Image (cartoon, rainbow, N blue to C red):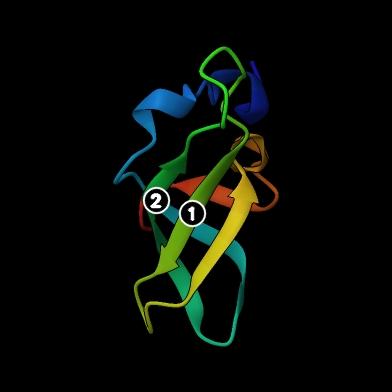
Amino acid sequence: MNSKEKNLLSPKKLLLTKWTAVKPSHKRKHFLVSKVILPELPEQAIEFVELEAVFDQHVRVIPWRELKDSEIWLQGWV
């Protein structure tokens, strides 16, 4: 089993989870999921989350499925 297969995530359980950027930018390495962005229609799937950098509170919105890519993100603060 490779790391992509074992990194099973549910968008509803991502709030306040910790992530480490594999390739930090502007000293932003550690992030916290500060918001799960709900779709306008309740029957639609969740697509995006808001990440907040611990270093400077910079906020960015990404597709939550990007967190499954171990070449970009590692779960926890490493």
The answer to whether 73 appears left or right of 33 in the picture is: right
- 40 or 58, which lies in front? 40
Relative image position of residue 54 (x, y in whole percent): 34, 73
- In this rendering, the answer to whether 30 lies above or below 19 is below
Residue count near mark 2 (Cα–Cα under 10 Å), binned few <14, some 14–19, many ≥20: many
- Mark 1 crowdedness (10 Å alpha carbons): few <14, some 14-19, many ≥20: some
Tell me the SS state at disc 1: strand
* Quarter-of-image position of residue 48: top right
In the rendered image, the residue lying farthest to the left is: 16
Task: Examine the rendered structure and indicate whether residue 55 appears above or below residue 19.
Answer: below
Say left or right for 38 vs 63.
Answer: left
Q: Residue at (41%, 65%) from the top-left corner?
A: 52
Name the residue located 61 percent from the left edge and 29 percent from the top edge.
3
Looking at the rendered image, the quarter that the C terminus falls into is: bottom left
- The quadrant of the picture occupied by the N terminus is top right
Disc 1 and disc 2: Cα gap in Å? 6 Å
Q: Are marks 1 and 2 in contact (CB under 8 Å)?
A: yes
The total number of labels drawn is 2
Nearer the observer, disc 1 or disc 2?
1
* Mark closest to the chain's N terminus, 1 or 2: 2
Q: Identify whether 25 is placed above or below 77.
A: below
Q: Residue at position x 63%, y 33% from top?
A: 47
Pointer 1 residue: 50
Q: In the rendered image, which residue does mark 2 sit on?
A: 33
Q: Looking at the picture, which amino acid does disc 1 mark?
A: Glu
